């Protein structure tokens, strides 16, 4: 049997796509794994599976429709690793009739704007009763079940080779990791850097400024990058290049990860960066009343704050910094627990309807 993983945004190590698809491919209990990815994906892929450079950014929807038509007519399973409303619509159009049971699985990471399209989605649920929706959170699962879909909660998969890091005893730097996006509070990071410069604070601050899988920044993010450059904060390091997985993980050693994410966007949305930080034994500052906060507070692995102003973030950083070794120790323990809870075996059990050992 073949497992077809569809991830149009996979073109490089950038963003969550690489680690997500790697985790799924690694755990698949079949030898034949085909990964339908972006056209720029061929050179860097070293993990299990045959990479298929297929999608162009400008033609993604049309290409998805024709790929769905092709794969629905072939043996094997189809898994959309980052699925949205458009995928459901295109699958329904591409099918000649009812998609058969145990054929297509869609992994939905968050609800977002899908709630506004409930009527459209309910029609698809009636026409395609055998589509299986896998969701990263319980609330998203409940939404799709209420519309008539087969839906199940599946933990966000993590690759087993993402090695746990020993906790650090000494604070070294602040860190903003991952793609530079406004919904991840990148503007608040610029505010914080200006505050550090104004108060002559000398903490090193490493800031990733790389784009998401869209490959280019919007004007809002470019404006914030210019603010960072104009701040003249001597101890900031702006990291614009896409990092290898090894170099990316190295960012977290001795760091406090600052994650002032939007409460509206991340109230019930999993963050790969939060999981990355804890896996690396890195304590975090996160936004209160979010998925991030619930995970961090459960393990006392950082500070959740509702005050995302520079002064509020500085207070949270100082609270961790005063007892950094203990926070790092608890973050490391949380990472061990979460790596087990987020094994990709959970998704493979849902897809293959069989027992799959944790990997």
Image: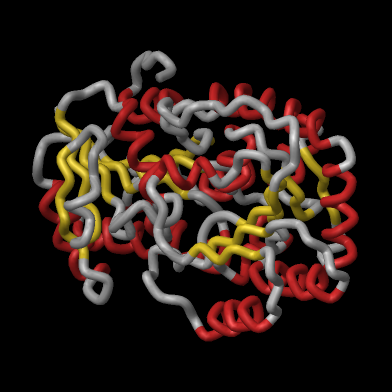
Q: Residue at x 76, y 45 (%)?
A: 293
Q: Residue 161 placed where, x, y %?
A: 41, 27
Q: Is residue 202 left or right of residue 86?
A: right
Q: Quadrant of the C terminus?
A: top left
Figure disc tally: 0
- Where 83 sits versus 153, above or below? below
Q: Is residue 39 left or right of residue 307?
A: left
How was this image coloured? Answer: secondary structure
Q: Residue at x 31, y 25 (%)?
A: 352
Q: Residue at x 69, y 31 (%)?
A: 168
Residue 228 appears in the rendering: yes
Q: Quadrant of the N terminus?
A: top left
Q: Residue 186 placed where, x, y %?
A: 64, 69
Picture quadrant of residue 336: top right
Q: Residue 236 placed where, x, y %?
A: 65, 65
Of residues 137 and 199, the one nearer the viewer is 199
Picture quadrant of residue 296: top right
Q: Residue 160 placed where, x, y %?
A: 42, 26
Q: Is residue 319 left or right of residue 329?
A: right
Q: Is residue 207 left or right of residue 355?
A: right
Of residues 237 and 56, the one nearer the viewer is 237
- Where 306 sits versus 172, above or below? below
Of residues 276 and 149, the one nearer the viewer is 276
- Where 228 sits versus 170, above or below? below
Residue 113 appears in the rendering: no
């Amino acid at each position: 049997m073949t497992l077809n993983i569809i991830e149009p945004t996979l073109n490089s190590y950038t963003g969550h796509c690489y680690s997500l698809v790697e985790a799924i491919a690694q755990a698949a209990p079949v030898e034949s794994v085909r990964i339908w990815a972006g056209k720029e994906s061929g050179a860097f892929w070293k993990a299990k599976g045959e990479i298929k450079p297929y999608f162009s950014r400008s033609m993604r929807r049309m290409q998805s429709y024709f790929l769905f038509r092709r794969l629905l007519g072939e043996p094997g399973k189809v898994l959309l690793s980052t699925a949205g409303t458009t995928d459901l619509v295109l699958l329904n159009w591409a099918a000649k009739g009812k998609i058969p049971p145990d054929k297509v699985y869609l992994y939905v990471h968050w609800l977002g704007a899908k709630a506004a399209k409930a009527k459209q989605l309910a029609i698809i649920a009636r026409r395609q009763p055998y589509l299986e929706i896998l969701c990263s959170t319980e609330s998203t699962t409940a939404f799709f079940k209420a519309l008539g879909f087969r839906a199940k909660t599946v933990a966000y998969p993590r690759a087993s080779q993402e090695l746990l890091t020993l906790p650090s005893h000494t604070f070294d730097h602040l860190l903003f990791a991952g793609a530079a996006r406004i919904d991840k509070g990148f503007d608040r990071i610029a505010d914080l850097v200006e505050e550090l410069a104004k108060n002559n604070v000398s903490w090193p601050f490493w800031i990733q400024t790389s784009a998401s899988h869209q490959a280019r920044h919007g004007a809002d993010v470019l404006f914030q990058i210019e603010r960072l450059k104009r701040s003249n904060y001597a101890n900031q390091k702006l990291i614009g290049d896409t990092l290898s997985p090894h170099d990316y993980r190295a960012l977290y050693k001795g760091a406090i990860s600052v994650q002032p994410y939007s409460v509206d966007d991340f109230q019930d949305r999993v963050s790969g960066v939060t999981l990355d930080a804890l896996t690396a034994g890195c304590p975090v500052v996160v936004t209160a009343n979010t998925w991030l906060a619930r995970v961090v507070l459960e393990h006392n692995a950082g500070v959740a704050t509702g005050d995302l102003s520079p002064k509020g973030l500085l207070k949270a950083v100082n609270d961790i910094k005063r007892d950094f070794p203990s926070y790092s120790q608890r973050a490391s323990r949380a990472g061990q627990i979460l790596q087990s809870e987020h094994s990709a075996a959970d998704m493979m059990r849902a897809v293959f309807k069989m027992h799959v050992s944790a990997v």
